Image: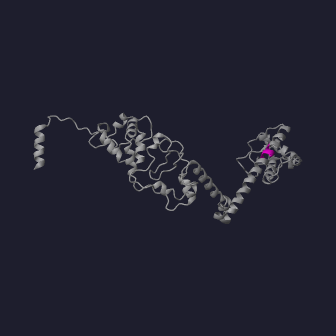
């Protein structure tokens, strides 16, 4: 009944149009107060005002200052630091209204827990005295490396960081309680635990404790985890690496020797390394990782030169009558080294050698 009365009163006040305009849906926008890159400089209030924070299209620029301050009072220290880097308007508001920082610290009633349950003494020193910059000014921390109550790393030298240092309202001394595992950093009764000299002494003691621990080498750990298979595999790998290195040296020496011999016999290197006799000798030296000498070449010189001369002769189109190899051609009137006494021979075009040469009477 109430809805019907409201509908009739609304229609009487705003009668429907004859041709209503077509419905256009508003573009979807992300419901967020802070842009995606809060630490990006150069963003102003004009860009932030285009971000809608309510479903009815209310923009940030239409909010009153009191509403903005109330929203900020429910934020934590990390949220205020993010808002402080958004634009100059937020930076000015947080600088003039320091009570917002006190309320943000008061929101942290439970403190900041440690990442692990029971840390060791060395781990705790490394965690607290880590060389990370200040979260606010991005400078190296000088006095208070880590604040457990705020959950951030902060220094107390610059004026813009001083508003975060101190005891919040209704908040226990969380930092003093968390720093109790490091009593040896206190060299006097009235000196705080987080002075630079104390930090330096704590770091030196931490390094000395780490270096004094008996740590096994990486090779020992790999040998223990891999067993006999890993040990033998590593031995084979070392031997293969040395073999490949020596083989490269031998191949380089043999190739330079063959190039010099080819120049002496006035043939190209490709023609010089073609004879099968020379190829077998070079492969034998390479397999034994031995460098080929000129004495070894003199023992096969006559056979290799005969094979080179035989391979340089033009080929005919006559098939070999013995092996019937249609892919190979034969040479006429060119006897091999093993049949110099019989000039009337037909030599097959296969690689030369005593077992692969067919001799036929003319």
Q: Position of residue 197 (x, y in %)?
A: 59, 49
Is residue 147 something that shows in the picture?
Answer: yes
Q: Kindly identify the residue that appears in the image at 11 percent across and 49 percent down.
A: 2
Front residue of 133/203: it is 203
| Residue, far front | 189
Front residue of 173/276: it is 173
Q: Position of residue 130 (x, y in %)?
A: 55, 50
| Residue, far bottom | 228
Q: Position of residue 136 (x, y in %)?
A: 47, 43
Give the image quarter of residue 236. Answer: bottom right
Front residue of 75/227: it is 75
Is residue 114 something that shows in the picture?
Answer: no
Front residue of 107/288: it is 107
Q: How is the image coloured?
A: one colour
Q: Kindly identify the residue that appears in the image at 81 percent across and 46 percent down.
A: 346
> What kind of secondary structure does the magenta stretch mostly adopt?
helix
Residue 109 position (above or below residue 159)? below
Count of picture labels: 0
In the rendered structure, which segment of residues is drawn in magenta? 251-255
Q: Position of residue 108 (x, y in %)?
A: 40, 53
Does 136 sit left or right of 340 as displayed?
left
Q: Kindly identify the residue that appears in the image at 54 percent across and 44 percent down.
A: 140
Give the image quarter of residue 173. Answer: bottom left
Residue 92 position (above or below residue 359)? above
Specify whether residue 156 is painted magenta: no
Q: Kindly identify the residue that appears in the image at 85 percent across and 43 percent down.
A: 305
């Amino acid at each position: 009944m109430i809805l019907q009365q409201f509908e009739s009163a609304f229609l009487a006040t705003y009668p429907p149009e004859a041709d209503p305009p077509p419905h256009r849906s508003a573009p979807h926008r992300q419901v967020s107060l802070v842009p995606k890159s809060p630490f990006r400089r150069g963003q102003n209030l004009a860009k932030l005002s285009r971000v809608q924070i309510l479903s009815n299209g209310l923009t940030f620029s239409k909010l009153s200052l009191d509403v903005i301050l109330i929203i900020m009072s429910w934020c934590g220290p990390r949220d205020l630091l993010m808002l402080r880097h958004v634009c100059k308007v937020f930076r000015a508001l947080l600088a003039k209204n320091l009570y917002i920082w006190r309320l943000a610290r008061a929101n942290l009633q439970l403190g900041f827990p440690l990442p692990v349950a029971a840390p060791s003494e060395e781990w705790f020193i490394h965690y607290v005295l880590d060389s990370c910059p200040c979260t606010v000014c991005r400078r190296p921390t000088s006095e208070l490396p880590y604040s457990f109550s705020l959950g951030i790393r902060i220094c107390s030298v610059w004026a813009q960081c001083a508003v975060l240092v101190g005891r919040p309202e209704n908040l226990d001394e969380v930092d003093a309680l968390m720093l109790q595992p490091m009593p040896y950093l206190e060299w006097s009764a009235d000196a705080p635990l987080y002075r630079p000299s104390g930090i330096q002494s704590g770091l030196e003691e931490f390094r000395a404790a780490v270096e004094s621990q008996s740590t096994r080498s990486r090779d020992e750990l790999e040998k223990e985890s891999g067993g006999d298979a890993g040990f033998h595999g590593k031995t084979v790998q070392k031997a293969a690496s040395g073999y490949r290195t020596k083989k490269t040296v031998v191949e380089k020496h043999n190739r330079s020797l063959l190039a010099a011999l080819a120049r002496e016999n006035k043939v190209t290197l490709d023609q010089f390394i073609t004879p099968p006799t020379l190829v077998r000798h070079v492969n034998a030296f390479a397999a034994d990782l031995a460098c080929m000498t000129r004495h070894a070449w003199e023992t096969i010189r006559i056979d290799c030169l005969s094979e080179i001369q035989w391979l340089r002769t033009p080929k005919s189109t006559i098939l070999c009558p013995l092996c019937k190899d249609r892919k190979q051609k034969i040479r006429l009137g060119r006897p091999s080294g093993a049949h110099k006494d019989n000039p009337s021979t037909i030599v097959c075009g296969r690689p030369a050698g005593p077992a692969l040469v067919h001799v036929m009477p003319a």
